[in-house]
Image: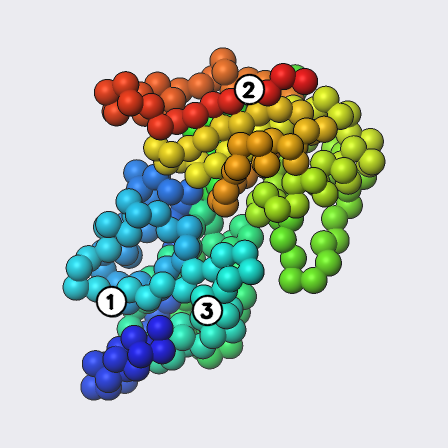
C-alpha cells in the first residue's frame, strides 16, 4: 500500500490547491443492487476509492477501471492497515484536492468506525459527507426471511458488537430481559460466550437463534437452532466470517417468510448455492 500511495502522490503533485472532499459511503451488505443511487454516483465519479474487506466482488466490479482504488480491509487478528493510518491516508489524499469515496461494507456509522474517520477529517477542516448504507442486520435478516420486529413476537431490536479493543462492556441482563430481537455483529468467535452470558442472565435456553453466513449473496447460508447450542452450530457447520447472529422468536418465521432462496434457485437454474439448515432441539 505504501508504494501505491507514493505513486498517487507523484501523479497528483500539480493537482488543485484547494482541499478535497471525502464521501463516507455505506456499500450495504453485499448485493450490488442494494447500493443507493447516491452511493453508486459517488463510486463512479470519485477520484480515488478507498475500500474495506466487506465490500463485495459485485460492488468492486462497479469501480471505474480508470479510478485508483486502495484496499484497507481488516480481518480478525489480521489488520492490513491500522485505523490511525487509514485516517492519515484520507487526510493526505484529500489535501491533494481529491474527491475520495471511502467505501465501507454495510453502514459506516454502525460498527464501522466511520465516526472516527469523520472526526479525523473534520479536525483538518476537510469537507465530509456521509451516505448511509443498508446495515447487515437489516439486509441479511431480510434475505433470510427473518423480520427484526414482528407483532406479538418482538417489539424492538438491539444491535450489539461482540468485538472490542479491550474488554466487552455489555449489560447481559438488560439484553436478556428486553424481549427484543438481538443482533450480534462480529460474534462468530464469541458464540459460546454470547450464549453462556445470555442464559446466565435469564434468557430461556430454548430461545431460537439464526446464523447468517455471507448474507445477501448467492453463497448465503442460514443455520438455525437454539441459544443453548449456538457454539455447537458454529463448529458443526464450519461457519466463517462474515456471519451475523440473530437471537429471538422471530427466527421461527424464516421458513414461512423465505423468498431469497427461490430467487437464487431460479437464477442458477436449479443449481442451489443457498443453504438452510434447521437443527432440532
- Image quadrant where one finds the N terminus: bottom left
In the picture of the structure, the residue carrying the numbered disc 1 is: 68
* Residue at (20% x, 86% y) in the render: 14
Quickly name the residue at label 2. Answer: 278
Find residue 131 and report its horizontal and vertical position in percent.
40, 53
Decide: few, some or many residues near mark 3? Use Cα within 10 Å; few <14, some 14-19, many ≥20.
few
Could you say which quadrant of the image residue 156 lies in? Answer: top right
Instruction: Find numbered disc 2 in the image and state the secondary structure of the residue it sits on.
Output: strand
Residue 1 in sight: yes
Q: Earlier in the sequence, mark 2 or mark 1?
A: 1
The residue under the point 46% across, 49% down is 107
Task: From the top left corner, tell me how far across and down residue 257 is, in percent.
Answer: 47, 17
| Tag nearer the camera, 3 or 2 | 2
Badge 1 crowding class, 10 Å Cα cut-off, few under 14, some 14 to 19, many 20 or more, is: some
User: Going by the image, does 10 lie left or right of 233?
Assistant: left
Secondary structure under the numbered disc 3 in the rendered image: loop
Q: Which mark is residue 81?
A: 3
Nearest to N terminus: mark 3 or mark 2: 3
Element under label 1?
loop
Amino acid at each position: 500500500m505504501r508504494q501505491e500511495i507514493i505513486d498517487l502522490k507523484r501523479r497528483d503533485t500539480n493537482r488543485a490547491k484547494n482541499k478535497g472532499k471525502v464521501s463516507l459511503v455505506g456499500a450495504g451488505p453485499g448485493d450490488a443492487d442494494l447500493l443507493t443511487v447516491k452511493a453508486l454516483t459517488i463510486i463512479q465519479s470519485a477520484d480515488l476509492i478507498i475500500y474495506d474487506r466487506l465490500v463485495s466482488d459485485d460492488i468492486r466490479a462497479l469501480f471505474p477501471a480508470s479510478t485508483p482504488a486502495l484496499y484497507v480491509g481488516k480481518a480478525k487478528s489480521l489488520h492490513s492497515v491500522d485505523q490511525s493510518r487509514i485516517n492519515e491516508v484520507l487526510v493526505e489524499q484529500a489535501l491533494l484536492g481529491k474527491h475520495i469515496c471511502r467505501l465501507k461494507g454495510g453502514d459506516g456509522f454502525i460498527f464501522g468506525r466511520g465516526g472516527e474517520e469523520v472526526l479525523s477529517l473534520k479536525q483538518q477542516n476537510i469537507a465530509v459527507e456521509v451516505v448511509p448504507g443498508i446495515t447487515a442486520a437489516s439486509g441479511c435478516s431480510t434475505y433470510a426471511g427473518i423480520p427484526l420486529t414482528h407483532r406479538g413476537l418482538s417489539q424492538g431490536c438491539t444491535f450489539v458488537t461482540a468485538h472490542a479493543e479491550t474488554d466487552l462492556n455489555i449489560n447481559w441482563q438488560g439484553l436478556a430481559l428486553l424481549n427484543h430481537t438481538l443482533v450480534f455483529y462480529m460474534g462468530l468467535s464469541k458464540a459460546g460466550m454470547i450464549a453462556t452470558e445470555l442464559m446466565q442472565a435469564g434468557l430461556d435456553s430454548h430461545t431460537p437463534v439464526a446464523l447468517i453466513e455471507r448474507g445477501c449473496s448467492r453463497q448465503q447460508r442460514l443455520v438455525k437452532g437454539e441459544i443453548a447450542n449456538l457454539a455447537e452450530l458454529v463448529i458443526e457447520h464450519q461457519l466463517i466470517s462474515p456471519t451475523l447472529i440473530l437471537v429471538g422468536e422471530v427466527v421461527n418465521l424464516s421458513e414461512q417468510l423465505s423468498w431469497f432462496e427461490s430467487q437464487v434457485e431460479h437464477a442458477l437454474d436449479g443449481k442451489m448455492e443457498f443453504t438452510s439448515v434447521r437443527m432440532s432441539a
